[in-house]
Image (cartoon, grey):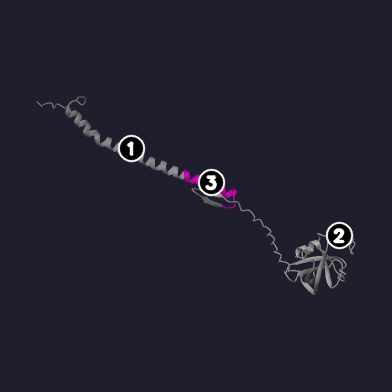
Amino acid sequence: MAQKTHSPDRNSHSPEAVTAETGHHMPKRRERLKAFMRLKSQNRVLMGASGALGAIALSLGAVLAVSDNSPETVRLGNGLASVDAEPVTQYEPLPVKQVSSPQPAPSASDIGAGQASYYGPGFEGRRTASGERFDPNDLTAAHRTLPMGSRVRVTNSQTGDSVVVRINDRGPFHGNRVIDLSQGAARSIGLIRLGTANVRLALMMR
C-alpha cells in the first residue's frame, strides 16, 4: 500500500512555507523595483532636457524679437539689448576768437623846443580861438601856428615829465615862449611852482 506523501499547506504559516514563498517571489520584486527606478531616472532626464529645450526656445524667441525690432543687438550681461542706429549730428565748429594785437604807440614828430608858460583862472570861461570856452582844468594849450585840434606832447626837459595837450587857442605872444598850457596841463609836468620851464614839443601823428 502506497504511503501518502504529506505536502505542506500553502496557506500554512509555517516557516518552511513562508521561506518557500518569499524565495519564489523575491527576484520578481527586485526586477520590478529596478525597472521602476530606471523609469524614474529616465523621466528626470527627459524632464531636464525638456526644461533646457524650453529655455533655449525662449532665448531664441527673445533674440528673434529683438532682431525684428532693432537693426542691431548687443549682449548686455546675461541678456540682449537692442541698439538703434541714429544719424550723427553735424556740429558747426566754434568760431575762432581773433586775438587783437596791441595797438602800436602813436608816433610823434619833433617840432622843436623852447619855454612854456601857462594861463589859468583869470581866463576861465572866455572864448578861445577855436570858439570853445576855456576850462583851466582841461589838457589844452595855445600855439601860434599849429592847426586847431592838433595834439602835442609837451615834455619838461628838467624832470622828463610829459603831457599830451590839444591845441584850441593861439599864443603865447610874450618873448620866446613856444606854447601856453592850461593850468591842468602845467600842473601835470611840474610847471605851476616855477611859472615857466624849458620843454620839448612833439606833434602826435595819430
The secondary structure type at the circle numbered 3 is helix
**Residue at image coords 33%, 40%:** 38
Specify whether residue 86 is painted magenta. no
Tell me if I can see residue 60 in this picture.
yes
Q: Is residue 80 left or right of residue 105?
A: left
Which quarter of the figure has residue 122? Answer: bottom right
Q: Is residue 134 visible?
A: no
Viewer-proximal residue, 155 or 109?
155
Q: Which residue is mark 1?
A: 36
Q: State the residue in front, 94 or 1.
A: 94
Figure quadrant of the C terminus:
bottom right
Q: Residue at x 35, y 41 (%)?
A: 41
Nearest to the eye among marks 3 and 2: give it.
2
Residue 187, x across and y down, in percent = 77, 63
Q: Position of residue 193 (x, y in %)?
A: 77, 64
**Disc 2 marks which residue?**
122
Residue behind mark 3 = 62
Residue 143 is drawn in which quadrant?
bottom right
Q: Alpha-carbon neighbours of circle 2 within 10 Å: few (<14), some, or many (≥20)?
A: few
Give the magenta-colored segment's residue range.
Answer: 54-72
Q: Which badge, 1 or 2, comes first in the chain's sequence? A: 1
Please tell me which residue lies in front, 134 or 121.
121
Distance between the Cα atoms at labels 3 and 1?
Answer: 39 Å
Q: How far separated are the C-alphas under marks 3 and 2?
A: 102 Å
Q: Which mark is residue 181?
A: none
Q: Nearer the viewer, mark 1 or mark 2?
A: 2
Under mark 2, the amino acid is Gly
Crowd around label 3: few <14 · some 14–19 · many ≥20 (10 Å): some
Quarter occupied by the N terminus? top left
Of the image marks 3 and 2, the number of the one nearer the N terminus: 3
